[in-house]
Structures are given as C-alpha cells and as structure tokens.
Image (tube, rainbow, N blue to C red):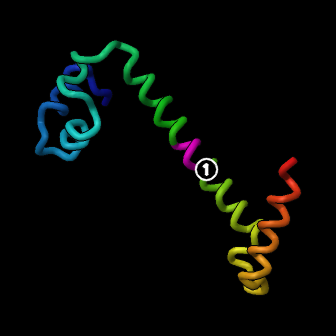
Amino acid sequence: MTKTYKNIVKDFDQPRSLKGLICKVFLPKDYPNSVSEDYTTYQVWDSAQALCSSVTGSLAINSVFKGIGVGDSSASSLSATSNWIIRDGIDRR
C-alpha cells in the first residue's frame, strides 16, 4: 500500500508516533509547506554527500595513523615519531 501525500503530512502532525517524532526532529517547522518542492531531493543528496565526506575523512585519518605506525605492535613510539618527521620533511619542498 502506497502512502499518499496527505498521509505523510498526517504522520508529521502526530509527534507521539516514532515517525512523527523523527519528522519533528529532522524536518523544518511547518514541513512541507515551509520549503520548496525540491527540498526533499536536495536534502537526500546533501545527506549522502555529508556521509561520503565523513567516510573519506575517516579513511584518510586511518591511513595517516597506519603510515606513522599507530596500531603496529612492532613499532615503538620513537620509530613512529621519527617516521612521521622524516616523511613530513621529505614531502615539503
């Protein structure tokens, strides 16, 4: 059974339901009347971009930590520090 536009708005107006609570927290006041027609599409893509950006940042930080020896049981803190300094010094021109 597909939901009609009126049913979606009705869910939004019922904050006691879980869906209504989520709508109250994440959607602007007086949604959908307070936004343009393309708001939902924009918000979906904006959220997807934010998620991808967060994942990319986490992977980059993980790679940096691995590069300096964090998490390697055979690497000492001194070797990780010197490794970082040497790599940082070589990369700067």
Name the element at disc 1: helix
Q: Residue furthest top?
A: 37
The residue that appears at 35% across and 13% down in the rendered structure is 37
Q: Categorize mark 1 by other alpha carbons within 10 Å: few (<14), some (14-19), many (20+).
A: few
Of the 4 image quadrants, the one containing the N terminus is top left
Q: Is residue 28 above or below residue 58?
A: above
Query: Majority secondary structure of the magenta segment?
Result: helix
Residue 3 place in picture, x, y as percent: 28, 27
Of residue 56 and residue 36, the one placed in the foreground of this image is 56
Establish if 89 lies above or below 81: above
Residue highlighted by disc 1 = 57
Residue 59 location in percent, x, y? 66, 55
Give the image location of residue 80, x and y in percent.
76, 75
Left/right of residue 10 with respect to residue 22 in the rendered view: left
59 displayed left or right of 45: right
Residue at 45% x, 30% y is 44
User: Magenta part of the protein: which range?
Assistant: 51-55
Q: Is residue 2 magenta?
A: no
Q: Is residue 45 left or right of residue 65?
A: left
Residue type at mark 1: give it. Answer: Gly
Q: Quadrant of residue 23?
A: top left
| For residue 39, above or below residue 71 | above
**Residue at 50% across, 29% down:** 45
Nearer the observer, 22 or 59: 59
